[in-house]
Amino acid sequence: MRRRFNITGLCSPERHYMVRLDDRLKKIKEDYIDYGSYFVINRGRQYGKTTTLRSLKKYLSEEYIVVSMDFQELGTEEFADTYIFTREFAKVFIRSSKTSGLNDIEELRKPLTELIEKRDSSLNDLFDRLSSLCASSPRPIVLMIDEVDSASNNQVFVEFLALLRKYYLNRDDTPIFHSVILAGVYDIKNLKLKLRPESEHQYSSPWNIAAKFKIDMSFSTNQIAAMLAEYEADYHTGMDIHKMAEKIYQYTSGYPVLVSSICKYISVYKRNESCMHVWLCCGQRRQSSDCKPHF
């Protein structure tokens, strides 16, 4: 399959030229997942969060059961009250679990299925059943939730985080997810939970248990060079890979979507053989007047 540089949506190594994530995934596993950390990956738009989560799910699959959810599947109405949120969360969890290693263990999902059929339910009901599921699971369960920003303004979600925190603090006695990863643009550690309805000034963070995520998700010069090397192996432009990688890094500081955007822009010149030299830099060949890549 022919590959190209991608700047929209999820990146796949089978379809796109992309930076290899092996070192990043290994570090996330060893520094966070294996220790049972709960943490947030908060980075700007098109910074590779979703691609990292999808790759991490596959990377962890031999040791963990990974349930990967996306809160974009829940509309505003799903956060209207606890009952609706509980049912819809259970539905998305069940749907997501079918590709996680729980697909053949219907009995584990049965308590959540029964919850969906109840006339009324609460977050406590949901967590009781999630706890039972985690206790019976053959491997530790890692929960990933992408696009948590879409829920951050809802009181129900804040209460959901508060219960996650409660179970995390008591997990030696009450089973719950081994690790939880929340991903979004903003750091939800700053959310506040009102402890008493009658008090306007007493607040506590529902997510102060989160480990600080310190892994650099920007691209280094060497990572860019490795991606360019794959392109060069296919198209033989004659570029000086490391010099080009340095030049791209200079203009982008390694911001993933900017790196891919420059590569994608330059790669379209492949269709015009007279413009192949746009991949060359540092004065190796003079550009013709009609070939002006915009860095």
Image (tube, rainbow, N blue to C red):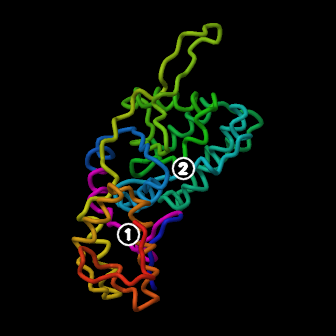
- Queried whether the magenta region covers residue 268, the answer comes back as no
Mark before the other along the chain sequence, 1 or 2: 1
- Distance in Å between CA atoms under marks 1 and 2: 37 Å
Q: Is residue 255 above or below residue 151?
A: below
Work out which quarter of the rendered image holds the C terminus and state it.
Answer: bottom left
Q: Which of 279 and 207 is in front in this view?
A: 279
185 to the left or right of 197? left
Mark 2, other Cα within 10 Å: few <14 / some 14–19 / many ≥20: many
Q: Name the residue under label 2.
A: 108
Residue 220: quarter of image: bottom left
Q: Which residue lies furthest to the front in this view?
A: 289
Q: What stretch is highlighted in magenta?
A: 9-29
Q: Is residue 116 above or below residue 208?
A: below
Q: Which residue is drawn at 74% across and 33% down?
A: 120
- Queried whether the magenta region covers residue 15, the answer comes back as yes
Q: Which residue lies furthest to the right in this view?
A: 119
Q: Residue at x 63, y 28 (%)?
A: 155
Residue 126: quarter of image: top right
